[in-house]
Amino acid sequence: MEKVSYDWRGDKIQYNFVLRAPADYDAGGDYTQLQIMREGKLVLEVNDNDGLAKLADALTAENKKLKKKNILKSKHLLMISSLKGKSKHPLL
């Protein structure tokens, strides 16, 4: 399990990003589930049976510099403060 926290909305309430793999999963340590929680409540759950790749393996050489801008201390999740979607909050 990997867990990282970040004040995603800037309102001093942490979001917890929890990566998990089933106990019987043997695909090299990749996580298959991402849970996003806020104040102990599940906000979103995403599952990928193929496993979530590490950033070092998933990013092209050209995009590896983005990894240095990651505001999450994670080897699997990438969030950069300057990349925003339709909201004012950083994209995950």
Image: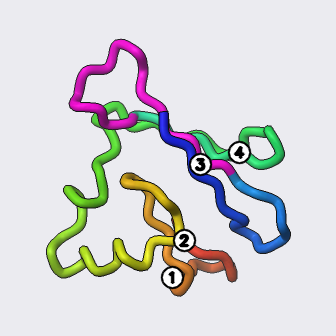
- Measure the alpha-carbon separation of dots 2 and 1: 6 Å
**Which amino acid lies under the numbered mark 1 shown in the image of this protein?**
Leu
Q: Which residue is mark 1?
A: 83
For marks 4 and 3, give the CA distance: 7 Å
First-in-chain label (3 vs 1): 3
Q: Which residues are magenta?
A: 16-31
Q: Mark 2–mark 1 contact, CB under 8 Å? A: yes
Q: SS class of the residue under badge 2?
A: loop
Q: Circle 4 — which element?
A: strand
User: Badges 3 and 1: C-beta atoms under 8 Å apart?
Assistant: no
Magenta residue check for 55: no
Amino acid type, callout 4: Met
* SS type, badge 1: loop
* Residue found 49% across the figure and 60% down from its top: 73
Mark 4 → mark 2, Cα distance in angstroms: 16 Å
Q: Are marks 1 and 4 in contact (CB under 8 Å)?
A: no
**At label 3, which amino acid type do we have?**
Phe
Q: In which quarter of the view is residue 51 placed?
A: top left
Q: Residues within 10 Å of mark 4 (few under 14, many from 20)?
A: some
Please give the count of numbered marks on the rendered protein: 4
Q: Is residue 23 magenta?
A: yes
The percent position of residue 3, horizontal first and vertical second, equals 56, 44
The residue identified by callout 3 is: 17
User: Residue 36 appears at what percent x and percent y?
Assistant: 64, 47
Name the residue tied to disc 4. Answer: 37
Q: Are marks 4 and 3 in contact (CB under 8 Å)?
A: no
Work out how far the residue at label 3 is from the one at label 1, CA to CA, in angstroms.
Answer: 18 Å
Where residue 56 sits in the image (x, y, percent)? Answer: 24, 60
Question: Which residue, given by chain and number where applicable, does mark 2 sit on?
Answer: 91
- 49 relative position to 33: left or right: left
Q: Amino acid at mark 2?
A: Leu
